[in-house]
Structures are given as structure tokens and as C-alpha cells.
């Protein structure tokens, strides 16, 4: 240490040390304008947000499965609870900012309140964990139960940047795949091995066609990177992970044509990975299968 | 331990050369300022990248022929994804990790605990220069053949592990990205060790744990998170580098076919990368936001002239959030193919993080209740912090439920959520810290009127950018799409995108006010006194800016808690921590 260099600071520090300016009960200027404006902005935020949700300005498309409806109910419950907290918290702050702005008053010395703190801790635990426990149901029903024995199996194979859907054909069995045989240009995008008899009647199509009111079991795979299978109306998405076969199931209860997209960043063509889910009547589904088998024989 | 200050550097500033004083300094204050300007540089790049993205999303066909790197003035999908990747990476690592923790923590942690230096000054210097090298390596990815990586800041494998066959930018660009992250991890680990040692070993006499300012608590907990999280990311980055360059297959499974070629890998697991990445990635969110919570508590007390409401609960909840933060990474992976049973555990743990967060919010409200609110710029940004923290936190209660994640995962809803709670809230914390501590750091005040205008525009602007994204997401708008033509329903969401983009440009322009204020005040700001905010903590008990050894020969001692504002019977409405009962009596007698 070089004492000569330090005593300069020593004096300065001593000087600063024990002094408190007297007469700090004066009022800061400019706080009124700022508090009114901030309270106003917070109220506007609440007003606009509540209006958008209450008037359903931007609704999610309606669901087409029973489980999707359950997801929607859980969504609505969560919206009510978080919405109430949102309104209370933002308006609570708006009120406090307005009410306790500097008007020359003296602040009240309140270092805490154990009873209040205990109360809102318990309230938060009950609200948040309760919501989580209730939310378990919609998830459990779609993910914990395996597909029923009579479910229609379709394999989804994703690759940069296409969806392919494979139906097992009349034998009900998916044939062997060999990645070395993959050749989209010669009409074998999945690498079906024709030496396997089970592979010969497998149908591969670029769109997913399923009958209404039947359980569909998807086996999701990827040929290259991580992709995803997402249909808004099903309230269902699942990643397609190379090296894994992931099973999900759903039962669509409304006819229609719905869009399938990829939500997992998979490369430069991520945005154009796209296909359709066609939910058709049982008879139309049979016609679709027959037509595919005919095309296969030609 | 307490006299680690280089004797050469303890001497008056004039005796040290420019290089040792400003570049390769071991002074924690200089290093803090270096980190601050590094983060400022990175955030400017990050903002420009996001403006390009927002512009492209809304006007994809506009010809920007004045920009040389766009082919014919149009942005390609891979260029868009390179922007996505680099924006996320720069912001998360070089802004949200560096500014709140490395910059302000470095400068003020020793000051607030009454220490003359960090525990390991040379290690501190090494941390900064490693971070600087990491930034250069990261930016170099822009200019190498193939450009910057397109795999996002999460770098999911195998997209990131198989090389350029997976797409442009996945060659050298991705390698540089991984190298940069590895260097950044080492820097952060060294920094974390330093913060932890300093907090444990170098507190002034009387500075018990329960007398530490909440900022110190936040930096301390954040440092522990950094130590545990960056160690895992470093290991994962090394394994990923080996997968790319040494033919290993940690994250790359067998049977992958890209561009018609069967890849020579077998036995790896993409889910392993996701687990390791998010084991780091989720605590990282708290690394970004905890210091902002500390600053908010600190500022709300100071500018309400009241003690922090429930100080003990505030310290405990910081620790609780830090601890729980390590148990929730799986909520990023509900639809990844992970076991659906573990999703429920991750979901309930995630919901339980809402509890300490709610306690903090209630205590912040309790702090300003019956206060004497002085709405200066630091206070405005702290109140703004609470507002966006509430908004962004509540949308997290949706995403924490796997059933709802089924419809929201991968959409703009997630983008809105994490930008509000991690981006905007953390940035508001940084702004509050800047306006609060600028006078201490540079000895000059920032312009208050410009600070206020900056706040109003930024507060309104941030909400206008991100609120519409919730609705885009609820309707199924997917993030990381460079174009809305991929799915038919996306076109209907364009008006919301347009609103968000216009707000983004306006808000970015408002930051010029901040930049002007910052650089103008550096040279022309009104000289600041030692304690311009009538605050209680130790950083205000030394001149602005503080001397090289912080307190000179005066050895600070602490006699009371950090937030003694408006104590009944006291002469003034604040009692600094270093005032002894005897000092207080003497002052009262004046």
C-alpha cells in the first residue's frame, strides 16, 4: 500500500460518512404527472386486454376432438384465474402509484406483515398447484392411455421438408424399411424394402386421410432432424425425433380438411412443411383405401 | 483475502498507463464498465437483427437492394433463420447474462458489501476478455462461407450436429457458434466463482447475510445458478463439437438420411441434447431475471422511501426460485417424445415457481403501499418491470400445463411469453440499474427528462410489440417461419404481425433517446454527489465515481439492515447502513 496515495480518499470517505441532510420532508417535483400517466397506462392495458379476450376477437379455431374440448375447458379455467390475477395486480399497482405518489407526506415504516405474507403464500400455492393438478386430466387422457385395439394405425414420417403418411394395407402390418433404399425421386421416400411381403401392400401418401369418429393412432418418426406434427383443431402436437417412434392418438368428431404444420425448427424450409388432415365419412375412407390399393397394383 | 488489491493499482490513477487502467485492468469497476459496453454493443446488433426479421415477416417481397448481403435485395429463408439464431444467442448470452450480472454485479457487488475488490481480480479480468473473444468468435459466424447457423439458439441436434448437409450455416458457422458458447461458458464459470467467493469472504464487518442488499442476494444466487448451469452447457457443447468433428455420436442417432446420404452415425440421442441444453437453458432464464428482481426491490424501497416489504421473504424467494429453476427444464420438452408421466412432475414443479414469484409481486406492492413515491427514471423502469413480469409470468401458467402446451408450443405465444418475462423485464431491470447507478459509475447524472420520455415510449412500445404475439400464437401462428405462405391460415394473422412490426421500429427508435442520454451525460451530465438518491447502502458512502480501492483507507462497517427508510423518530427519512448508533445520535443533535 502506498499511504501517500490513499489519504486523499480517506478524507473524502470520512467526509461522506456520517452526515444526513436535514429537512428531507420536502416534495419531489414531477411525480404527479408521472403517476397519473402510469396509472392510466396500466388501466388501459387491463381494459384492452380484457376486452380482446372477453369479446373473443382472436379465438382459437374450434376443436374437433373430445380431448380437444377438454383442453379448451382447462384453457378457459386458466384464463379466468390468470385473468383475475392480471386485473388485480395491474390495477393494484395503478391504484398504489396514484394514491401514494409524493405529495409531501411521510412514508409509513412497514418492514413486513407476517400474517399477510402467509395468507398470499397459501393462496398462491392453492391456486397454482390446484390449476396444475386439474390440468393433468386433459393430458393424461390423451397420453397415458395407449390407443384402443381397434384404432386405425397410420405412420407419419417427416423429413426435410415433407410429411409422408403410410397405411399398412390389407395385411394390417407395416413392412420393413431400410434407410439405404430411401429415394424420393423414384417414388420410395420411406425406403420400403420390397423383399418383405408386408411392405408390398403398404400405401404411402402425402396427406393424412382418416374416417370420422374412429380412433386414429399415429406412429411419428423422422428421417433426418427433429420435426413436429401439429394440427390446431386437434389441440395436439408431438415432435418427430430421429431414432424414435412416438405414438399419439386422437378421435376426430367433425368432417373437414385441416392443416398440418411443423412447429420444430428443422432447416431452411421449416416454414413450408405442410400437409392436410382430411377427416372423411367412413364410406369415403373405404373408397380412399380401395383407390390406393388399386393404384399400387398398377 | 481482504487486501488483494494490487498495490500498484491502489495508487492514484495518473500513475498507471492507459492500457492497465482501461483495457487490461483488474479493477472490478472498470471490468463492470467494460462488460456494460460489451452488452450495449451486442444489444444494438441484436435489435438491428430483430428489425430485419420483423420487416421481412411483414414485407417479404420488399427489395432492399442497398443491403449487400441480401441477394437481389430479398432475404432467403436461411438468412432469416440465421437472424433468428444470432438474435437469440446475442441477446440471451451477451446481453441478458452479461449486463445484469457481469456488468452491474461486478461494479456494485463489492461496493455494496464494503469490499475493496473482487476476491480474484485477475480471474475477473480473464472472464471479461474470454467473453470478448467469445463475442468475436460468435460474430465471425456471419462472415464465414455458408453464413451464420440456422438451428436457433437452442441448436437442436441432429440439425446442429451433422454439418452443412443439414442446411446452409450448419458448416463452419455452427462450429464457430459452438466454440463461442464454450468460451462463454468458461468465462461465466470463472465469473461465478469470483462472485460466490467475494460474497462469502469479503463482506465488511457487520454485513451479515440478512443485512445484504437484495441486489447482492440476487447476484449471489445468480452466480450459484451460473456455476451449476454453465458447467453442464460446457460439457454438452464439447460433446456436440465432437459429434461434428470427431465422428462421435452422442446426440446423433443411426439411420439419418440427409440430401440422399446416409449419415455415418449410430447410437446417439437428440433427446439427450435437449435435456442437457434445457438443464442449462431454464436456469439461464433466471440468471437473466434474478438480478432484475434484486434491482427492482432495491429501487422500489429507495424511491418509495420505505423498507422493502418482507425483506426475509424476498431473500428466501430468490433462493427458492433459483432452486426450483433447476427442476423445471422438462417443461420445454412436453411434446418432445419425453415420457408423458414426467411431464406432470415438471408441470407441477413449474407451477410451484409461480408461488415465490407471486410472493415477490405482492411484496413489491407492499413496498410501495403507504410510501412516498418519487417517480424518477429508475423507479419508472422498476414499476414497468413489475408490470411486464406479472404479464409474462401469468402466460407462463398456460405453458406450464402440458395439455395446453399441446396447442401453444412452438407458436408466437411462447415468443410473447419469454420476451416479456425474460427479455423486456430483464431489460427494464437493466435500464433501472443504469439510471440508478450511472451517477455513481461516471460521477455525472443522466438527464431525467430524457429518461422519462425513454420510459414512456419503451413501456408502451414493448407491450405493443409483444401483446399481439399472444393472439398470433393462440390462432396457431408458428414461430421461426420465414414466410406466411407455408400454411393457408397464416395469412389472416398478418395484420397482427404488421402492428407488432411497426411497434418494434418505433420502440427501437426510442432507444436512440437512451443512447443519446447515455453518451451525452458521460461528458456533459450535471456532476453527481456521492449520494444523489438519499440511499442507504454502502455504494453511496463513497465518492462518485469511487476511488480505485472503493473506500480508501476507511474500512466500512455495517450497523443495520439495508433499507432503513422513514424510520420513526429518525432525523432524516433514511439511515445509511454504515451509521453507528453513536453517529446517529450525533447527527440527530445537529
Image (cartoon, coloured by chain):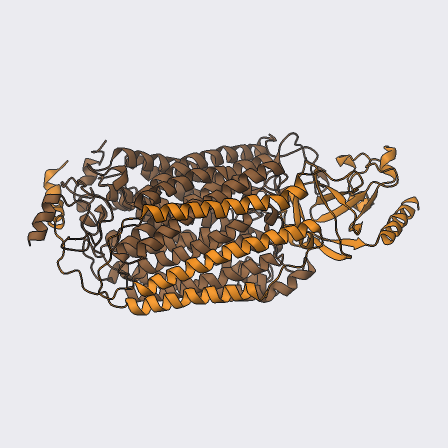
Chain colours: A orange, B brown
A151 horizontally vs B396: left or right: right
Q: Can residue B68 be seen in this view?
A: no
Dividing the picture into quadrants, the one containing residue B476 is bottom right
Q: Nearer the viewer, residue B66 or B214?
A: B214
- Image coordinates of residue A65 in percent, x first then y, are 71, 51
Asked if B36 appears above or below B283 in the picture, the reply is below
- Image coordinates of residue B405 in percent, x first then y, are 59, 48
Numbered circles on residues, count: 0
Q: Which of A238 and A49 is in front in this view?
A: A49
B71 horizontally vs A207: left or right: left
Q: Is residue A171 visible?
A: yes
Residue at the (21%, 46%) spot, across then down: B538
- Image coordinates of residue B578 in percent, x first then y, are 17, 44
Q: Quadrant of the C terminus of chain B?
A: bottom left
Q: Quadrant of the N terminus of chain B?
A: top left
Residue at the (40%, 68%) spot, across then down: A40
Residue at the (69%, 37%) spot, across then down: B256
Q: Which of B470 and B15 is in front in this view?
A: B470
- Image coordinates of residue B227 in percent, x first then y, are 40, 35
Amino acid at each position: 500500500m502506498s499511504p501517500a496515495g490513499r489519504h486523499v480518499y480517506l478524507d473524502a470517505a470520512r467526509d461522506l460518512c456520517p452526515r444526513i441532510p436535514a429537512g428531507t420532508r420536502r416534495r419531489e417535483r414531477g411525480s404527479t404527472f408521472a403517476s397519473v400517466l402510469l396509472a392510466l397506462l396500466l388501466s388501459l392495458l387491463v381494459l384492452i386486454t380484457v376486452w380482446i379476450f372477453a369479446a373473443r376477437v382472436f379465438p382459437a379455431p374450434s376443436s374437433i376432438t373430445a380431448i380437444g374440448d377438454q383442453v379448451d375447458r382447462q384453457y378457459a379455467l386458466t384464463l379466468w384465474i390468470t385473468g383475475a390475477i392480471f386485473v388485480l395486480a395491474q390495477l393494484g399497482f395503478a391504484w398504489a402509484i396514484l394514491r401514494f405518489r409524493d405529495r409531501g407526506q411521510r412514508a409509513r415504516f412497514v418492514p413486513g406483515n407476517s400474517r399477510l405474507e402467509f395468507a398470499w403464500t397459501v393462496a398462491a400455492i392453492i391456486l397454482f398447484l390446484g390449476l396444475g393438478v386439474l390440468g393433468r386430466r386433459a393430458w393424461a387422457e390423451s397420453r397415458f392411455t395407449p390407443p384402443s385395439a381397434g384404432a386405425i394405425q397410420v405412420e407419419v414420417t417427416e423429413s426435410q421438408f415433407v410429411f409422408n403418411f403410410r397405411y399398412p394395407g390389407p395385411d394390417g402390418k407395416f413392412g420393413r424399411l431400410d434407410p439405404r433404399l430411401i429415394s424420393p425421386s423414384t417414388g420410395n421416400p420411406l425406403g420400403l424394402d420390397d423383399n418383405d411381403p408386408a411392405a408390398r401392400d403398404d400405401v404411402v401418401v402425402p396427406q393424412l386421410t382418416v374416417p370420422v369418429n374412429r380412433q386414429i393412432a399415429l406412429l411419428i418418426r423422422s428421417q433426418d432432424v427433429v420435426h413436429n406434427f401439429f394440427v390446431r383443431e386437434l389441440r395436439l402436437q408431438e415432435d418427430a425425433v430421429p431414432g424414435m417412434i412416438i405414438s399419439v392418438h386422437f378421435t376426430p368428431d367433425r368432417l373437414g380438411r385441416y392443416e398440418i404444420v411443423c412447429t420444430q425448427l428443422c432447416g431452411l424450409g421449416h416454414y413450408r412443411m405442410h400437409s392436410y388432415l382430411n377427416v372423411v365419412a367412413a364410406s369415403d375412407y373405404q373408397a380412399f383405401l380401395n383407390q390406393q390399393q388399386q393404384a399400387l397394383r398398377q | 483475502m481482504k487486501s488483494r488489491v494490487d498495490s500498484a493499482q491502489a495508487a492514484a490513477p495518473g500513475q498507471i498507463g492507459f492500457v492497465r487502467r482501461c483495457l487490461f485492468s483488474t479493477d472490478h469497476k472498470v471490468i463492470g464498465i467494460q462488460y456494460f459496453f460489451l452488452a450495449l454493443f451486442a444489444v444494438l446488433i441484436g435489435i438491428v437483427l430483430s428489425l430485419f426479421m420483423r420487416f421481412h415477416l411483414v414485407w417479404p417481397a420488399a427489395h432492399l437492394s442497398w443491403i449487400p448481403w441480401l441477394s437481389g435485395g430479398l432475404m432467403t429463408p436461411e438468412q432469416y433463420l440465421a437472424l433468428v439464431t444470432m438474435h437469440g444467442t446475442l441477446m440471451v448470452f451477451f446481453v441478458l447474462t452479461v449486463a445484469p450480472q457481469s456488468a452491474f454485479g461486478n461494479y456494485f457487488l463489492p461496493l455494496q458489501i464494503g469490499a475493496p475488490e473482487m476476491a480474484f481480480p485477475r480471474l475477473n479480468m480473464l472472464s471479461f476478455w474470454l467473453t470478448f473473444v467469445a463475442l468475436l468468435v460468435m460474430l465471425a459466424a456471419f462472415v464465414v462461407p455458408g453464413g451464420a447457423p440456422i438451428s436457433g439458439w437452442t441448436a437442436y441436434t441432429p440439425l446442429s450436429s451433422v454439418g452443412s448437409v443439414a442446411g446452409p450455416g450448419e458448416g463452419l458457422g455452427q462450429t464457430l457458434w459452438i466454440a463461442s458458447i464454450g468460451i462463454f461458458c468458461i468465462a461465466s464459470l470463472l465469473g461465478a466463482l469470483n462472485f460466490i467467493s467475494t460474497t462469502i469472504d469479503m463482506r465488511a464487518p457487520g454485513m451479515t447475510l440478512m443485512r445484504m442488499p437484495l441486489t447482492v442476494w440476487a447476484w449471489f444466487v445468480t452466480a450459484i445458478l451460473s456455476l451449476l448451469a454453465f458447467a453442464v452447457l460446457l460439457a454438452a457443447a464439447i460433446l456436440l463439437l465432437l459429434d461434428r468433428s470427431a465422428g462421435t455420436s452422442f446426440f446423433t442417432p443411426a439411420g439419418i438420411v440427409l440430401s440422399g446420404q446416409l449419415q455415418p452415425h449410430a447410437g446417439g440421442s437428440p433427446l439427450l441434447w435437449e435435456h442437457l441444453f434445457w438443464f442449462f437453458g431454464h436456469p439461464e432464464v433466471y440468471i437473466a431475471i434474478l438480478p432484475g428482481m434484486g434491482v427492482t426491490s432495491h429501487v422500489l424501497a429507495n424511491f418509495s422511501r420505505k423498507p422493502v416489504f418482507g425483506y426475509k421473504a424476498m431473500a428466501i424467494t430468490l433462493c427458492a426460485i433459483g432452486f426450483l429453476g433447476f427442476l423445471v427444464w422438462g417443461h420445454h420438452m412436453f411434446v418432445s417424445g419425453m415420457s408423458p408421466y414426467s411431464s406432470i412432475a415438471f408441470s407441477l414443479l413449474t407451477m410451484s415457481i409461480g408461488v415465490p414469484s407471486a410472493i415477490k409481486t405482492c411484496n413489491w406492492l407492499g413496498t410501495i403501499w403507504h410510501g412516498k413515491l418519487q417517480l424518477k427514471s429508475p423507479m419508472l423502469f422498476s414499476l414497468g418491470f413489475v408490470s411486464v413480469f406479472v404479464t409474462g409470468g401469468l402466460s407462463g401458467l398456460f405453458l406450464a400445463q402440458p395439455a395446453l402446451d399441446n396447442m401453444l408450443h412452438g407458436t408466437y405465444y411462447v415468443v410473447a411469453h419469454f420476451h416479456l418475462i425474460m427479455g423486456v423485464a430483464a431489460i427494464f431491470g437493466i435500464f433501472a440499474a443504469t439510471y440508478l447507478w450511472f451517477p455513481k459509475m461516471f460521477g455525472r447524472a443522466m438527464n431525467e427528462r430524457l429518461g422519462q420520455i425513454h420510459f414512456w415510449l419503451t413501456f408502451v412500445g414493448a407491450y405493443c410489440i409483444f401483446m399481439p404475439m399472444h393472439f398470433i400464437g393462440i390462432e396457431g401462428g408458428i414461430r421461426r417461419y420465414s414466410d406466411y405462405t407455408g400454411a393457408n391460415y397464416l395469412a389472416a394473422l398478418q395484420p397482427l404481425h404488421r402492428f407488432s412490426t411497426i411497434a418494434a421500429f418505433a420502440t427501437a427508435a426510442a432507444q436512440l433517446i437512451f443512447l443519446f442520454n447515455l453518451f451525452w451525460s458521460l461528458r456533459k451530465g450535471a456532476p453527481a454527489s456521492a449520494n444523489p438518491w438519499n440511499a442507504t447502502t454502502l455504494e453511496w458512502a463513497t465518492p462518485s465515481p469511487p476511488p480505485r480501492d472503493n473506500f480508501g483507507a476507511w474500512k466500512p462497517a455495517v450497523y443495520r439492515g439495508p433499507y432503513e427508510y422513514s424510520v420513526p423518530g429518525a432525523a432524516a427519512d433514511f439511515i445509511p447502513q454504515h451509521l453507528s448508533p453513536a453517529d446517529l445520535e450525533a447527527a440527530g443533535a445537529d
